[in-house]
Image: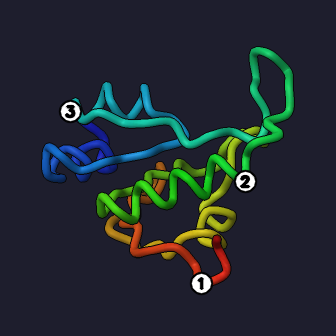
């Protein structure tokens, strides 16, 4: 039985673009394709992501254009961005909250994002 968050993603349209901090976990539970939200630090390589802001802005543009979604799990490791950090760049509309995390719809870039 899928988690409530995975079940919510499963109900999204097949062509919905979904990004998450834990794409494999979400894909296993929902069967929906999920792309990875860039981390601030690459765990395996142990390197800082110097392109993080640029990558997050580009992801925000894609999700805005495609009316995409973001899933952020609770208590992420320090390498991952938080919902608050993402909300500084994109307008997030809460779709569903569960004990494991939250599904948001991306509703555009913030005015200061270029």
Q: Which mark is residue 1?
A: 3
- Residues at circles 1 and 2 in contact by the CB criterion of under 8 Å: no
> How many numbered circles does the render carry?
3
User: What's the distance in space between the residues labelled 3 and 1, CA to CA?
Assistant: 41 Å
Q: Nearer the viewer, mark 2 or mark 3?
A: 2
User: For the N terminus, which image quadrant?
Assistant: top left
Q: Position of residue 40 (x, y in %)?
A: 76, 41
Quarter-of-image position of residue 62 = bottom left
The first of marks 1 and 2 along the sequence is 2
The first of marks 2 and 3 along the sequence is 3
The residue wearing badge 2 is 53
Secondary structure category for the residue under label 2 = helix
Q: Position of residue 59 (x, y in %)?
A: 51, 51
Q: Name the side, left or right, on which 50 lies relative to 102.
A: right
User: What's the distance in space between the residues labelled 2 and 3, CA to CA?
Assistant: 36 Å
The residue wearing badge 1 is 111
């Amino acid at each position: 039985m899928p988690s409530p968050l995975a079940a919510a993603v499963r109900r999204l349209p097949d062509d919905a673009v979904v990004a998450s901090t834990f794409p494999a976990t979400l894909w296993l539970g929902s069967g929906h394709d999920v792309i990875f939200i860039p981390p601030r630090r690459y765990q395996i390589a142990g390197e800082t992501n110097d392109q993080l802001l640029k990558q997050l802005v580009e992801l925000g543009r894609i999700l805005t254009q495609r009316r995409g979604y973001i899933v952020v799990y609770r208590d992420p490791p320090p390498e991952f961005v938080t919902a608050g950090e993402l909300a500084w760049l994109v307008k997030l509309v809460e779709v569903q909250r569960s004990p494991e995390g939250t599904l948001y719809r991306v509703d555009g870039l913030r005015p200061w994002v270029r």
